[in-house]
Amino acid sequence: MIVQLAAIPIIIGSFLMAKYLGVILGLITIIIDLALFVIGLWVNFSFIRTVSSLTIGLVPEPIMDTFKKTRPVLWKGFSASVMSGLIMVWPLMATLSLYAIASYILQVMGIMSFALLLKIALVLLVLYSIIHFILYAVRLCFNTFHAVIYNTPAMKAIKTSAEIVRGRWWAIFGRIFVIGLIFIAGGNLLSGILSQIGTSVGGAINILMILLSMLVSVLVGPFMLLAMLILFHSAEKNLTNQPPISKV
């Protein structure tokens, strides 16, 4: 009898564990994903500060010191990136939302005579949204750099990026286009060539070509970031009252 009574908590615990195991594992997964995201952001911003120092001729600080001093700018850099992203995509989000609402209303009311007009309006607004996205993607391309390097609040970093680009939109767009063409298109082309060579030859050469292709893919990001930082520091020289690089 005592053994049977002692087994009751075990049975109840097993039942609750089975019932809530999915929820618990889901929460653990979310926590791990958030932790990895923050660590990745921290590493990325630390790399930005280190490479920024190199591009303007300063001696980079030790890695651990850089990590410590990057922590206070994590939120500023992240919020600047999110806010600029929302500025870039809000017309497209608003267009798709309004189109879905208008389509639903017309369908419920049985008024389909405006369907063609609605689709034409959708196409025009999507075209405007694409132009808006490209315009502001260039105008705000330096905001995260400014927030991370100079410890600048998000809104000020966004305004400063727009000020840097003002009057030189086409010049900066052209440079960004060339950077993307060299590193993204060039990197993909080189990786494809290496993979094709490895597939054609086979054996150990194939393994070597796969490793080289992976190396090219890994190096594209850092070198592209380096090119963008060089462009940023070159473009910001025309600004007056530029704050010193943050040592926080």
Image: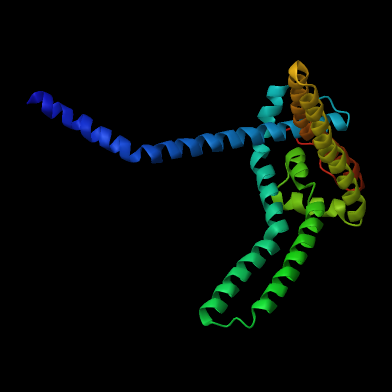
The image position of residue 28, as x and y in percent, is 46, 35
Q: In this orientation, does residue 125 appear?
A: yes
- Quadrant for the N terminus in the image: top left
Q: Considering only vertical position in the picture, is 102 above or below 138?
A: below
Viewer-closest of 204 and 72: 204
**What count of labels does the image hold?**
0
Residue 45 image offset from top left, x and y in percent: 71, 35
Residue 182 is left or right of residue 216, and the answer is right
The residue under the point 85% across, 28% down is 58
**Compared with residue 162, is residue 208 higher up or lower down, i.e. above or below?**
above
Occupied quadrant, residue 122:
bottom right
The colouring scheme, among rainbow, by chain, secondary structure or one colour, is rainbow
Residue 246, given in percent of the width and then of the height, sits at 76, 36
Between 31 and 16, the residue placed more toward the observer is 16
Q: Going by the image, does 36 lie left or right of 207?
A: left
Q: Is residue 71 visible?
A: no
Give the side of residue 18 with respect to residue 56, left or right.
left
Q: Residue at x 80, y 22 (%)?
A: 201
Q: Nearer the viewer, residue 102 or 226?
A: 102
Quick one: 58 or 241, which is closer to the camera? Answer: 58
The residue positioned 39% from the left and 39% from the top of the image is: 22
Q: Quadrant of residue 104?
A: bottom right
Which quarter of the figure is the C terminus placed in?
top right
Reply above or below: 21 against 117: above
Could you say where residue 210 lies in the image, as x and y percent from the top left?
74, 25
The residue sitting at the top extreme is: 204
